[in-house]
């Protein structure tokens, strides 16, 4: 799997999303309570941009007239027709066995670790203080 640096951590506030392009693919990047997740940006229903969708929670009920909100900000609602997908897994909330969007592994890596490589010809002191979001495809 190739790793692609897509953003600095401070570029994406909690509860927000961002469109990034990785290896020619549009990827929706989400910050859920300080954790980063990436899914394909295209809704499988009719192709809407999921990064433009609202991040919502899950309404659960054990009996009529009683409900509670859980999983705040962990689902994205398609901006065109309201289909909802789990930001963590890409699975459709209504039909998880058959409908999903591709999800990608995401890590947060210290900037200094990104400069390491297998070859070194000449060394200069370098410091990178920010953290970066890295998507693996």
Image (cartoon, helix red, strand yellow):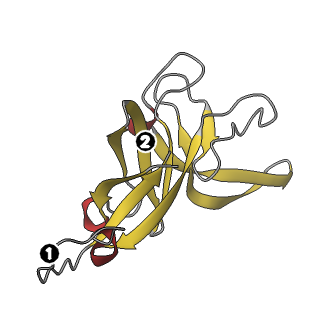
Residue 114 on image: x %, y %: 32, 68
Q: Which mark is residue 122?
A: 1
- Residue behind mark 2: 28
Rendered view: 68 above or below 85:
below
At horizontal 61% and vertical 53% (from top left) the residue drawn is 88
Q: In the drawing, does residue 132 fall left or right of residue 91?
A: left
In this rendered view, identify the residue nearer to me: 113 or 8.
113
Residue 74 on image: x %, y %: 58, 55
At horizontal 75% and vertical 55% (from top left) the residue drawn is 67
At horizontal 46% and vertical 49% (from top left) the residue drawn is 2
Q: Nearer the viewer, mark 1 or mark 2?
A: 1
Q: In the drawing, does residue 92 fall left or right of residue 10?
A: right
Q: Tag 1: Cα neighbours inside 10 Å, few (<14), some, or many (≥20)?
A: few
Q: Which mark is residue 57?
A: none
Q: In the drawing, does residue 56 fall left or right of residue 59?
A: left
Residue 132 on image: x %, y %: 32, 66
Q: CA distance from mark 1 to mark 2?
A: 38 Å
Mark 2, secondary structure of its residue? strand
């Amino acid at each position: 799997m190739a790793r692609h640096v897509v953003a600095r951590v401070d570029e994406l506030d909690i509860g927000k999303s961002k469109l990034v392009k990785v290896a020619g693919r549009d990827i929706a990047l989400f910050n859920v309570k300080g954790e980063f997740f990436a899914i394909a940006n295209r809704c499988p229903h009719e192709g809407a941009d999921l990064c433009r969708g609202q991040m919502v929670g899950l309404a659960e009920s054990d009996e009529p007239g009683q409900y509670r909100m859980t999983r705040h900000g962990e689902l994205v609602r398609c901006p065109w027709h309201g289909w909802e997908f789990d930001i963590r897994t890409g699975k459709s909330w209504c039909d998880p066995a058959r409908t999903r969007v591709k999800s990608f592994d995401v890590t947060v890596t210290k900037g200094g670790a990104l400069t390491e490589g297998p070859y070194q010809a000449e060394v200069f002191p370098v410091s990178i203080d920010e953290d970066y979001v890295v998507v693996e495809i």
